[in-house]
Image (cartoon, helix red, strand yellow):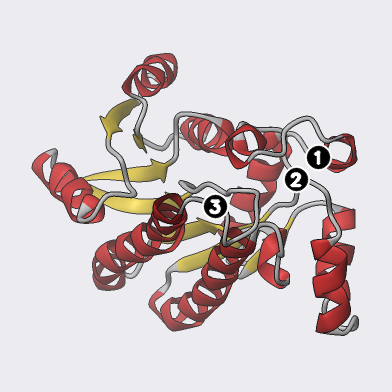
Amino acid sequence: MIKVALITGASAGLGVEFARQLSATGHRLVLVARRQERLDELAKELGNSRAVALDLSKAGAAAMLMADLAKAGEEVAVLVNNAGFGLVGRFASLDAARQRTMIDLNIGTLTDLCRAVAPGMIERKSGAILNVASTAAFQAGPGMAVYFATKAYVLSFTEALHEELKPHGIKVSALCPGPTRTEFGDVAGFAGIKAVDRIAMNAAPVVKLGLEALDRNQAVMITGTLNKIGAASTRFIPRALLRKIAGAIKY
């Protein structure tokens, strides 16, 4: 079997950076996203990669992806669960189907892929899983209610998985970036907000910190000093006040 690093959401933003940095350290890659043309361009650039165009929000997507890997004679040595998106707006006003798609992708497929690769990693007593969460995971988010909740799931789930798989020699980390200069804001609906742009990090250092944390099996990596302070403050500030502060943000 050919050992690969599987990267979801690999056609843009953090996904592209994960691909470039893992490729630079010698990993053979499987790149997954919806946009075939972008994936093909990236795979051509890197050379040691192949592209799989797949909408991971669809039912059964994880099983289809694992079947594709098996057919290619590949096994996942590193899983980067990066695919996901957010939406800005009041819960009762946002499209219901689109919000459910967010849950299916941010939570459902991420969980399915972890479940698909974990038994093999346990058997081999090696492997690594990096789940991309967010600083949104540390509090409720009025105005982005479902997105914040999905990332809280990712953080909690990943921390539990870290403890379960550690005795088997498997590394598991949650990467929790704050605002990052990617296409995320365009999709979510808050691109161009100066307050966000001022504190946003570039994708490359965020990915570098995430991969370094995974390498040393650090359960949670929060990127950036301000983000670390913000996440830590949620332990001391009353939740009622945190909700009001978050709800006052104008996206």
Give the residue pinned by disc 3: 94
Where is residue 17, by image quadrant? top right
Q: Which residue lies furthest to the left in this view?
A: 71
Which x, y percent locates residue 116?
Answer: 25, 63
**C-alpha gap between disc 2 and disc 3:** 22 Å
Is any part of residue 115 visible from this angle? Answer: yes
Identify the mark at residue 234; answer none if there is no mark.
Answer: none
Report the mark closest to the observer, 2 or 3.
3
Report the mark closest to the observer, 1 or 3.
3
Q: Is mark 2 in CB contact (under 8 Å) with mark 1?
A: yes
Crowding near the residue tagged with mark 1, few <14, some 14–19, many ≥20 C-alpha atoms within 10 Å: some
Give the residue pinned by disc 2: 179
Please name the residue shown 34% across and 53% down the image: 77
Please name the residue shown 22% across and 46% down the image: 65
Indicate which disc, 2 or 1, sits on the residue closer to the N terminus: 2
Q: In which quarter of the image is the C terminus?
A: top right
Front-lying residue, 78 or 51: 51
Indicate which disc, 1 or 3, sits on the residue closer to the N terminus: 3
Query: In the picture shown, does residue 180 fall above or below 250?
Result: above
Front-lying residue, 28 or 156: 156
Secondary element under disc 3, as helix, strand or loop, is: loop
Which x, y percent locates residue 167?
Answer: 44, 82
Amino acid carrying mark 2 in the image = Pro
Give the residue pinned by disc 1: 200
**C-alpha gap between disc 2 and disc 1:** 5 Å
Please name the residue shown 50% across and 57% down the image: 130
Query: In the picture shown, does residue 138 fall above or below 1?
Result: below
